[in-house]
Amino acid sequence: MQFDFFNDSHSVACRNDVILALEQCDAAAARRAWQTLGQHYPQDECLSPLLRLIEAVAGRTQAPFRDHRALRDPRQALLHDITPVAHSALGASGAAVWLRARWRELAQRAEPLVYRAEHSEDHAAPLWLRGADWRAAEQAVARIESWRRIPAPLSWMLHARLALLGLQANWGLLAELAWLSPSRLDDVVKQTADPVLQPWVAKFDQIFDGLGDASDLAWFPAWLLTQRPSLAPQLAQAQASQHSPPEQALRLLVELLGLERQGRQREVIDHRKTLRGLHASLYAAYMATR
């Protein structure tokens, strides 16, 4: 079988002309290059997805969104329509770079919008996160009143600060999210792909005997303390939440570790009984290290 290397290289060059113009957000140049590609290669499978991206670039604007509903449609279009098309036309790495810029544009336009629980995804912070602008996301969350008591903003802040500061500086924030919304912590763990956090969560999922779903992560901070007692100072920095059993367990374990170091056996026994009453699997994990 023989290949027409000239035609193959020419078609690639034509596609690259379109892609280069898209990367530069030059809709007019991209359209001219697309027309050239179509004239020479009318059956090229990239024609349709490239045209969709050209239309997206041509429709760009810097006008701020007037309300949350105005943001909803372009946000969903970028997520569900344009993102798969970009991956098809630009490849994984090229699409990632191009899409980050589009998310940042949406985030900038969303900056005037205040946080509303009923429109939680229509806010600048999660858009900045998709655009991988961690500092802008952190600043957007910080402007939300009582963000530390609201699951969505708390998860956004943890995501941003993990990227900015790393896990060691954020154990307390992670514990607060685990107690307030374990399902959102599950999302953050998957999105950040932290090389330290993910193996610990995987081990927790494997050996912790709970309900078998994301709600078990509420117990993760306390369980982690049974495996890594040295994290007690960092985890103890978590602000008081709703005094739930998982939070009680962490506070109890911090006290218990201190009592053990001091050799106060009578109080150690009392604290162990209380821990056993909070969760049998957590108590077993603690005793396994004794």
Image: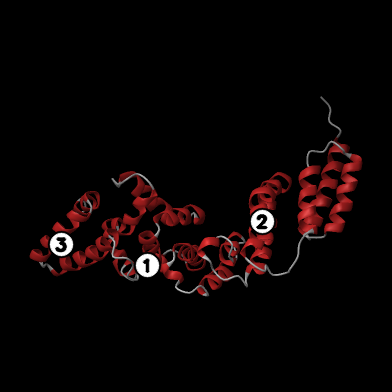
Q: What is the residue that sits farthest to the left in this orientation?
A: 266
- In which quadrant of the rendered view does residue 212 lie? top left
Judged from the image, the secondary structure of the residue bearing numbered disc 1 is: helix
- In which quadrant of the rendered view does residue 112 lie? bottom right
Residue 73 image label = 2
The structure residue drawn at horizontal position 60% and vertical position 62%, both measured from the top left corner, is 127
207 horizontally vs 91: left or right: left
x, y percentage for residue 234? 34, 68
- In front of the other: label 3 or label 2? 2
x, y percentage for residue 67? 64, 67
Amino acid type at image mark 2: Asp
118 horizontally vs 7: left or right: left
191 horizontally vs 271: left or right: right
Amino acid type at image mark 1: Gly
Q: What is the residue that sits farthest to the top in this orientation?
A: 1
Can I make out residue 194 in this image? Answer: no
- In which quadrant of the rendered view does residue 64 lie? bottom right
180 horizontally vs 289: left or right: right
Amino acid type at image mark 3: His
Instruction: Report the Cα–Cα distance between label 1 and label 2.
Output: 36 Å
- The quadrant the C terminus occupies is bottom left
Mark 1 sits on what residue? 172
- Crowding at dot 1, Cα within 10 Å, few <14 / some 14-19 / many 20+, comes out as many
Q: Which one is in front, 84 or 63?
A: 63
The structure residue drawn at horizontal position 77% and vertical position 49%, both measured from the top left corner, is 52
User: Does residue 59 lie above or below 40 as drawn?
Assistant: below
Mark 3 sits on what residue? 271
- In front of the other: label 1 or label 2? 2
x, y percentage for residue 115? 54, 68
